[in-house]
Image (cartoon, grey):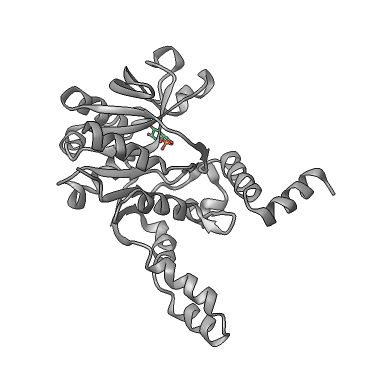
């Protein structure tokens, strides 16, 4: 009972990050010297997944190119004697087995997951929303997979958020069966504070049962006029166990300027060389 496939919805247009995302895929924005998407892919591989399924769109070709060979660049690096850099470029293209499926219309997260049905319908699979970047000691997806392996069922990552932030997320509630682990019985996508069943927000990591697909097929649109994964999970929780895990780690919402900038500063502070530079800039010396 383990999770070998991980789905990445990456077709979103990144409107919260305009104008930079007018021409650049938000997943390709750098966190220090690597694109945001590479952190999610490493997390999936570090959690034992062997196959990555990207649900992509027409403006996201740069993601495919990043994980592919680049013969012109490789040739140039070799001719210039930059073997170390050459090896790094090759390693990126050999990182993972990646499949790409086009989401032709932006109909929501639930619809993006549904696009993965042709390859994910026979087993439990992971989902990573790459905007949510975690600095952790153990990959957050791996924390969820461990709960799935012990208890079965689907698993979602939870974080306690303030009242002001409740309406930005999917909110879940349930019965705490072990410290930090809930059996979920209710979920609402982006509720008003007065309608929220708790302050536990769903963060961008999931282990999903393939039974999610028939539910998504028959489900109408929800919050924001989109097909919502949260709505499908609420239906799933009526038939099968869905657990919520309060994950260990620190999250940065790299789909917003503030979160992206904070992640860059934090990662730079963790690098001995860059740390000195950041402190110097902040202290104005
Ligand atoms: C999505 C989900 C939401 C979840 C959030 C986490 O929302 O629909 O339930 O809480 O990711 O980042 P989005 O950020 O795409 O609006």
Task: Point out the residue furthest to the right here.
Answer: 285
Is 165 above or below relative to 68?
A: above
Q: In the image shown, does 47 or 211 lie closer to the viewer? A: 47
Q: In the image shown, does 1 or 153 lie closer to the viewer? A: 1
Residue 25, image x, y percentages: 47, 55
State the residue at coordinates (75%, 47%).
Answer: 279
Is 145 above or below relative to 191?
A: below
- Quarter of the image where one finds residue 193: top left
Residue 275, image x, y percentages: 69, 50
Residue 94, image x, y percentages: 37, 68
Task: Point out the residue furthest to the top here.
Answer: 194
Image quarter (top left, top right, bottom left or bottom right) of the N terminus: top left
State the residue at coordinates (43%, 66%).
Answer: 92
Displayed-image quarter of ligand 1: top left
State the residue at coordinates (61%, 41%).
Answer: 262
Is 46 above or below relative to 212?
A: below
**Count of picture labels:** 0
State the residue at coordinates (38%, 24%).
Answer: 180
Q: Does the image show residue 67?
A: yes
Q: Does the image show residue 228?
A: no
């Amino acid at each position: 009972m383990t999770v070998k496939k991980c789905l990445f919805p990456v077709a979103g247009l990144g409107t919260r990050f305009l104008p930079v995302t007018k021409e650049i895929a938000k997943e390709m924005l750098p966190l220090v010297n690597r694109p945001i998407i590479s952190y999610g892919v490493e997390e999936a591989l570090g959690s034992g997944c062997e196959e990555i399924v990207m649900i992509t769109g027409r403006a996201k070709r740069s993601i495919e190119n990043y994980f592919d060979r680049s013969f012109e660049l490789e040739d140039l690096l070799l001719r210039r004697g930059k073997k170390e850099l050459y090896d790094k470029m090759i390693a990126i293209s050999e990182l993972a087995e990646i499949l790409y499926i086009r989401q032709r219309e932006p109909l929501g997260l639930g619809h993006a997951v549904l696009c993965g049905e042709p390859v994910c319908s026979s087993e439990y699979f992971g989902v990573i929303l790459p905007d949510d970047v975690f600095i952790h000691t153990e990959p957050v997806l791996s924390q969820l997979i461990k709960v799935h392996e012990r208890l079965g069922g689907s698993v979602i990552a939870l974080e306690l958020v303030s009242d002001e932030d409740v309406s930005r997320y999917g909110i879940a509630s349930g019965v705490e069966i072990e410290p930090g682990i809930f059996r979920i019985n209710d979920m609402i996508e982006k509720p008003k504070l007065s309608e929220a069943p708790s302050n536990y927000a769903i963060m961008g990591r999931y282990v999903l049962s393939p039974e999610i697909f028939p539910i998504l097929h028959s489900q109408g649109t929800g919050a924001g006029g989109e097909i919502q994964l949260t709505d499908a999970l609420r239906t799933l929780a009526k038939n099968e166990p869905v657990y919520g895990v309060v994950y260990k780690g620190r999250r940065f919402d790299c789909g917003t300027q503030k979160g992206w900038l904070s992640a860059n500063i934090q990662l730079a502070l963790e690098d001995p060389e860059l740390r000195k530079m950041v402190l110097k800039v902040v202290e104005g010396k």
